[in-house]
Image (cartoon, coloured by chain):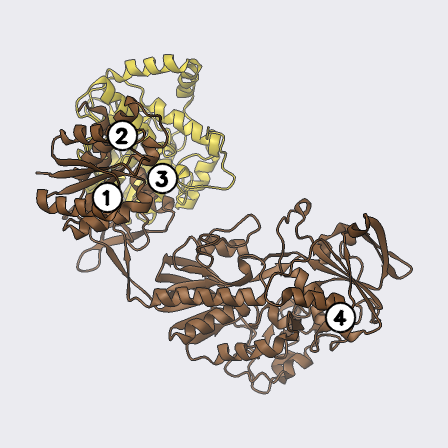
Amino acid sequence: MARIGVFVCHCGENISATVDCGKVAETIGKLKHVVLSTEYKYMCSDPGQTLIKEAIKEHNLTGVVVSACSPRMHEPTFRKACAEGGLNPYLCEMANLREHCSWVHEKNELTTEKAIDIVRTQVEKVKLNSALQPIKVPVTKTAMVIGGGIAGIQAALDIANTGHKVVMIERSPSIGGHMSQLSETFPTLDCSQCILTPRMVEVAQHPNITLYTYAEVESVEGFIGNFTVKVRKKAKSLDEKLCTGCGLCTTKCPQKKIPNEFEQGMGMRPAIYIPFPQAVPNRPVIDREHCTYYIKGKCKICEIVCPTKAIRFDQPDEIIELQIGAIVAATGFDIKHADFFPEYGYGRYKDIIDGLQFERLASASGPTSGVIKRPSDGQIPKNIVFIACAGSRDPAKGIAYCSKICCMYTAKHAMLYKHKVHEGKAHVFYMDIRSGGKNYDEFVRRAIEEDHVNYIRGRVSTIYERNGKLIVKGVDTLLSSMPVEIEADMVVLATAGVANSGAEELAQKLHISYDSHKFFAEAHPKLKPVETNTAGIFLAGACQNPKDIPDSVSQASGSAVKVAALFSQNELTREPLVAVVNRMGPPLHSTCVGCFLCQAVCPYQAIEREDIKTRDGKVLKSLAKINEGLCQGCGTCVALCRSKSIDLHGYSNNQVYAEVVALLNEY
Amino acid sequence: MNNLISRAKELLESKTVNVVIGYEAGPTGLARPAFITDSAKADKLIYDERCVQNLAVYLTKAEVKNFGKMAIVARLPVMRSIMMLISEQQVIGDNLIILGISEDNSLLDIASISVMQGYIDKCDLGNPSKDREILAELNKMTPEEKFSWWQNQFSKCIKCYACRQACPMCYCIRCTVEVNQPQWIPVQANAHGNTEWHILRAMHLAGRCISCGECGRACPVGIPCHLLTMQLADQVWNYFHVHAGTSDKMNSVLSTYEPNDKESFII
């Protein structure tokens, strides 16, 4: 016989101001099977919880209804209190008298009557509750880091240094990301490569890190602690074990006119190439799209010259399956290029370049060996214009956000230019200078005051070519919007940072949310900045929004701690409020007929196929089976199942039916 | 018909199949389903306008499944039922040989499921014209008129569930009406429960009905319950441009989302 205890909370005055809590408790107390119905000012307080714990023992309760607030906050509180009182926590239900009643109605009798109805449904429900046990799922203690830029590298190293295995996936032939392309870094002007390459080497040599370059995520299935990730290792067309990275093949390749991605198209590369001299791994790949052999069926010069016979033209893509416990998405960003800007000639003028191209011009390892030469004729520009906020903070262009890094790198670019071309003039058009960060504003001041960079507050309306000069027309808003016209030799656009190509597809594979700009979404903008809405998947770096190196590295270390915390446990505990397919003895085994329509509607891929077999392996019947680790208890499958073969623990058909019937019946 | 008999004999003699599911003449002259396991008895097979039952309904029965490989006499609705049953994983296509019957009652050469799909694609997949006419009349009524018209029809229902038994898509081994914890649908035949049953049956067949009309034909008290599922088949076609039973790989139209799905029905 059910013995139900009902505890009506006043929530200070949140509930009692409009609901007559005394009357609710009194009326409910008269219901069948309710052996205790009482009220208290703050049920969630320590005395309130003690009241519940003691009542469970004193009245030998078999079910508890706490009539208080939304279960979102305090269901765990009261379940815990019940457990401490000796009752299975899942025999405790909450009736939401605050959000569902007192906050939305005025004080009158009807409000109290509605409160009584809400409690009545829960009393009927709790009678049918069953004692549930938490689900334990194992944790695979291997992390996957997607993306080998500075964020990915930091996350991978931090996780690996906690003693856990890490798999790093990078889609280009080398790790390093955008940071490896930069010449110097703000605000210290130290060489980007010099601080990055040791980390890249550390990744390659770390005993806990497995590196897959030229590889992409094919599919992700599973759940926190238990992901199964399929990775496509694109064919590099060579045997990595035999290749020594001597680079002879890259010098002999007859295709030499392919725009070099690492140089942002400012230089050329062959079809078999190592992206840059410090690449990790330092092995070439064949770009099959441009290789003469794959286009015309003839050539194979690299195969002939290779001293170790490592070239494999017939190598297929390989799909590997990995068991992964946690994932860090660190896929980085991209920038808009000059062709995004009609007002600046859609990329028609060779000497209008973007920030990354300028980085390559300024880099000692770049196409000009660090001499600032303009692309059109190789002349050193005497007059250079930098335009900040090219695309960013421009709702008309669909990019309303601030790209965050451009103010700082523009100051850096102007400074680098002045350091290399002493007699040259540098102008910066800006909207605002956003230099929040340690030593950031000092850095900008240095550009203005010590290096005499001409900062003009205003936007550039148009750029056109006249007599071999780029005429930059803008305004100076600090001089009453006076028109400004500068005859420039070169223009550098600090173009907007945007989500990386393929970000949307990856987010869909990972089942994580992303915003309208395709940047990955964090679980909470302030308090969960590295978590995603999918448990076990974390974010690092500019895949979330444009970030500079210090921010990316901090966030990467943050996500590494989250992964390490997850891996510190051997088992994860989950709520047992999951769906279940009924089972019975042979010959039926279950009323499930195996139509698997539930599989199509499950948003969590939690429904598997289970074959019931005889001892000699003959399949008698195929049934749907719920993976308890994946199921979130949404109940979509329960609603869909025609034969009502699926039920939801904690919200069974019987319980919901009892709630509805309670409302229809007089009391 | 001779073609059908000789083909059935050939299949049974060569042990390609263990049973041929077709029609034979019953004692009163009506056609009835026949399960021919012996080639000598294949002569009993008939095919003419009397052969109306949807034989696909037998394919999901355990005792029929035990035959293993089987051949089935199939006109268009049966073929479409088979497609649905394969797509819902109730029947294994490789176990079936289709003895297709064309509109003019001649034997079709259907070597595989994909050939059958080709044949189905060329057919008119809308509801039968006589039912289309009745539906058009019904759709002219106001919702209140329609409701009372159907209430009047449902009042005749004796809850024999012949509609369910005749339907090849009603293959659940336990129907919702047999669930008694909780008892969703009242057992007894009353106006309220009858309406619930017929609406529930129609909803379970939404997007799955292949318009064979067997449910209405099987009803002993003459409720045109096939009109409910046919109306839904029409609506599924209008909204999603999908006819049930046109491919063995089709996804359930009402439980899968396509980016170009119309959403005009969301109010």
Check whether the beta carbons of the residues at disc 1 and disc 3 lie within 8 A of each other: no
| Colour of chain B as rendered | yellow
Instruction: Name the residue that disc number 3 marks.
Output: B84
Circle 2 chain: A
Residue B68, visible in the rendered structure: no
Circle 3 chain: B
- The foreground one among A347 and A448 is A448
Residue B190, visible in the rendered structure: yes
Circle 4 chain: A
- Residue at image location 22% in from the left, 27% down from the top: B161
- Residue at image location 64% in from the left, 61% down from the top: A435
Check whether the beta carbons of the residues at disc 2 and disc 3 lie within 8 A of each other: no
Asked where in the image residue A375 lies, by quadrant, the reply is bottom right
Instruction: Name the residue that disc number 1 marks.
Output: A650
Instruction: Name the residue that disc number 4 marks.
Output: A450
Q: Chain letter for brown, please.
A: A
* Amino acid on which disc 1 is placed: Gly
Q: Earlier in the sequence, mark 4 or mark 1?
A: 4
